[in-house]
Amino acid sequence: MGRTASYDRDAVLHAAMELFWARGYHATSLKDLEGALDMRPGSIYSAFGSKEALFRAALDRYARAGRAALDETMAREGSPIAGLAAHVRMLGHAARKPAPSRACMLVKTLLETPRDAPELRQAVEDMMRETETAFAEAFRAARDKGEIAPDADPEHLAARLQASIFGLRAYAQRTDAVDRVERIAEDIARDIESLRR
């Protein structure tokens, strides 16, 4: 009979995600992981295969949580444009909540990942593309419903929105930025709402 894992995988991934999100991949040592996860190195490698594989699993958890929050907001609001604007406002308010970092974990990872780690870089870019695709689908739905102009370009609007959000989340890392982040998020949300016909 096979041995069952003696750890809670979800709890371990959550702890790993918070540590990597706070410190970044390269600044997080195996010793740091041992302490945060309450696991010995052999157990970490047995469960995940490598530090990079653990990081990718934690990053995937972060990306899935972000996408679930977006989906929930889009479903709750009355229209695609209202949903996107509400999502941006939620990100602006998030700067006041306790978190390992106010910057987006995906942005931090992209900026710190060298080109000589192509698989990790590709994984991060794929996660970013998935979010941008979700934005494009929302803008396309808004166009199809006549909420925005018929000649609006959903892909361009999605790329612009993602760039704005990433800039916002990077700016939020500043110690004096909390109040400004909410105001800037409100500006971005109003820019989205101004697309309505």
Image (cartoon, rainbow, N blue to C red):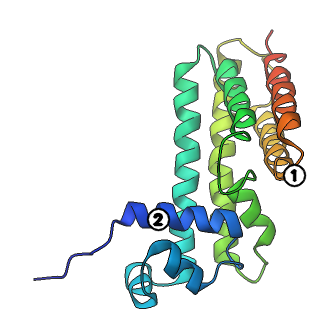
Residue 13: mark: 2
Which residue is located at x 57 percent, y 85 percent?
31
Location of residue 172 in the rendering, given as x and y in whole percent from the top left corner: 82, 47
Q: Earlier in the sequence, mark 1 or mark 2?
A: 2
Q: Is residue 56 above or below residue 185?
A: below
Q: Amino acid at mark 1?
A: Arg
What's under tag 2, amino acid-wise? Leu
Q: Secondary structure at mark 1?
A: loop
* Residue 87 placement (x, y as % from top left): 67, 30
Which residue is pictured at 79% across the width and 78% down the height? 115
Between residues 38 and 192, which one lies in front from this camera angle? 38
Q: Quadrant of the N terminus?
A: bottom left
Residue 14 horizontal/vertical position (percent): 49, 60
Q: Residue at x 87, y 32 (%)?
A: 184
Q: Which residue is mark 1?
A: 174
Residue 94: which quarter of the image?
A: top right
Work out how far the residue at label 1 is from the one at label 2, CA to CA, in angstroms: 27 Å
